[in-house]
Image (spheres, coloured by chain):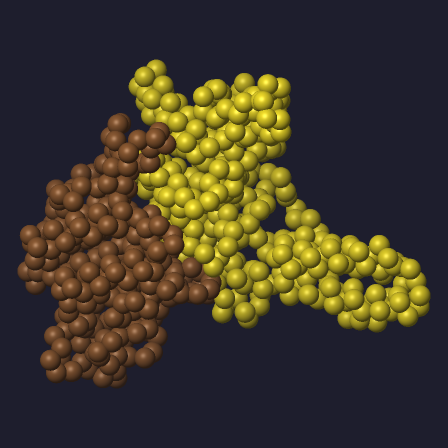
Amino acid sequence: MADRVNTGVEGLDAMLNGGLIPARPYVVSGPTGSGKTILATHFLLEGLRAGEPCLLVTMDEPPSEVKANMGVFGWNLDRLKILDATPDVRAHKRQRSVIDVGTSLDVRDMEDVQGVRQSSQIRALEVSVHSVQKMIKQEFSQRLDRYKERYRRVVIDSLTALKMFSMQGEDSRILVQSFMRFLSELESTTVIVSEHLNPTQIETEFFLSRGEIRLHKWLDGNVMRRGLSIEKFRGSAFDDHIRPAQIGKTGLVVFPNMQAAFRSETALAGSGEAFLESRIIGEVANVLDSVLRQIDEAHRRQIPIKNIEVAVSRAMVHFQRRHYQKALKQALACDSELRQLLGESPPPPPPTAPPRPPEARR
Amino acid sequence: MIGLGKIRTGIAGLDRMLHGGLVSGRPYIVSGPPGAGKTILSMQFLKEGLEGGERCLFVALEEPPNELKINMRPFRWNLDDLDVLDANSDIRRFEPTPIMEISTETEPIKMRALAERIRKTPDFESKEVSVHSLQQLLKNLFIKRKYHRVVIDSVTALKYFCMREFEEILTTQSFMRFLTEAGVTSLLTLELPEIGDVPPEAFLARGEVRLHKLRDESGIRRFISIEKYKGSSHEEYVYPFEITSAGIGVQVPAAAPTPAA
C-alpha cells in the first residue's frame, strides 16, 4: 500500500483507509458554515507538525481574518506560508490601472500577518486564474531554490471564489481543467475548498478531483447537527457512511464508529444532501404556515403589522431563492414577533422554537 | 439473437443482464455520478478483452495515466498490455501564442511502460486536445493497430474541454458515428449530476449501462441497470452491485434467464 497523507482530522483518516493518496488534488465541499475551512486548516496544521512546508492560498478571507479565526482554536500556524489572493476594493475610476495580483504580492509567513491589506489608492489588484497560477509557480520554484524542498501540502480556499471572480464566461470549464492540471503537476497533496452551487450540474472540479470529502449540516429539531461523508476516492477503499461530526474547542472531530442521527424515514430514501434540504424545507414551510395564519388573525383583530408583512415577504423571497437558512431565520423572527403582538397563545399548531445556536461555533 | 455477435463485458452478472454481453462493433455509454465505479467497470471490460488476446485501448481524458496505473493496482489485474492514450490537455498558456493541438502522431503507451509520476507540461508550449485532432489521431491508430475494445474516459471531459459549447451535441454524435464506422466495441463513460436530467449524450449510443449511487443507513449502496440496449433483449430490473478487491460484482439471481448465447 502506498504511503498516505494524514488529514489531521480526528476520525477522518480512518474513514479514508489511512489518509489521502499523496500528490493529488482533492475537493472539500459543503454548505456555508459547515466547516470546510476548518478541515483544510487541520490538514495544513498536521503538515506543519510533521515539519512539512505548507502553503495556503486564500481568496475568500483576508489573511488577517484567517489568523484571527483560527486563533480561536489555539493553533500555532506561524510557519504556514500564506498567499494572499483576495482582490482589492475595485477602483471604479478609469485612470487607475488594474494589475494582476501575481505581479506585485509576496508570500508571507502567517506570523507576519497583521491587519487587512489596504487597497492602494493608485492601483487596484485584481485576481485572475493566470495570476494565481503564476504566483503559486513562482513560490514553488523559489522554495525549491532556497530550501531544496517542495511544498507538500497546499490548500486553495476557495475555488468557488476564484471561479466567481475570474472564471465567468464560456471558457470557465477549460480554465478549471487547466487549473486542476496545474495543481496535479505540482505533485503536492492539494485540498480545494469548493461549494456545490447547483446539484443538477456537473461541476468540473468535482469530477476532475481524485476525491471528494463532503460536509453536511442539518437541523434536528432545533439543534444543528453536522456530518461528514466521502463521496469519491479514487484508488482506495473508504468508509461510505455519513458519520457524525462536531466542531468544538479543538476543531473538527469525526466519529467514524457512530451512525449519523437521521431520525426520519426519508433518510432512507434520499441521498445526503437532498435529504438535508428536504428537512429544512419542511421546517421553513411549517413556520411560514403558522406565520401566515397569525397574520390572518392579526388582520381580523385589526392589529397593524405592516413591518411584519414586509419581513415575511422577505422570508419568502429567500425561500424562493433556495436560501433556506436565511428564510428560516427570518420566518422564526416574524413568528415570535407575531406571538408577542397577538398576546395569547395562537391557535395554530405550535411551530418549533427558534433553533438554539449549536454549542460550538467559530 | 441470431446473427449478432456478442462479446463479454468481463462482469458475469452484467453479461447475464445483457442476455449474453454487448453486440460487438458498437458504442455504448456507461453513466453514473462521480464515484459510482465507471472507470472500474470499463477497466474490467478491457481486462476481459486482454485475456482473450484482443487489442485494447484506453483513452484517458480526465485522469492522468500514471494515477490510473496506481489506482488499478489493488485489483491485481494483468493490464500490462493495455494501450493507454494520454489525452489530458496541458496547462493552458495565457500568453497570446498559437494553440498547439495534440499531434495526430501521438502514440499510446503500454500500461507496463507508464511512468509513475505525472507528465509535466513543457515550459514553452502547451498541447491542447480538441475533438478534431483526437478523432484524427484515433483514426490513424485504428488503421495501424486493429483495436477490438476501446474505452473513452470520459465523454463528459471530451465535451467540456475539447469542444466548443454551441456544437456539443452534434460533435458528440459525429464522434460516436466515427466509433461505429471504425468497427470497435467502445465504452464511453458519462458523468451524471447528483440530481436532475441525464445529459443528452446518453441517447446517442446503442446502449446505456447506468450506475446508481444511493445513500442510506448502511452507507453507499450501488445499483446497476440497463437503460437502453438496441438490437437485444435485456433485463429490465435494477440490480445491486458491489465494488470489492475483485472489481465490480453484480448479483443477478440465478432465476434470471440465462443468456441465449
Query: Would you say A328 lies left or right of A15 here?
Result: right
Q: Residue furthest top?
A: A146
Numbered circles on residues, count:
0
Residue, x 35% and y 75% (percent of image)?
Answer: B238
What chain is colored yellow? A
Q: Position of residue A10 (x, y in %)?
A: 47, 43
Percent position of residue A55, x then y = 43, 28
Where, quadrant-wise, is the C terminus of chain A in this rendering? top right
A222 on left or right of A345 = left
Q: Which chain is brown?
A: B
Q: Residue at x 33, y 53 (%)?
A: B159
Q: Position of residue A36 (x, y in %)?
A: 52, 43
Looking at the rendering, which quadrant does residue B101 occupy? top left
| Image-based side of A23 in relation to A71, left or right | left
Left or right: residue B238 versus residue A301 is left
| Quarter of the figure with the N terminus of chain A | top left
* Residue nearest the observer in this picture, A35 or B261: B261
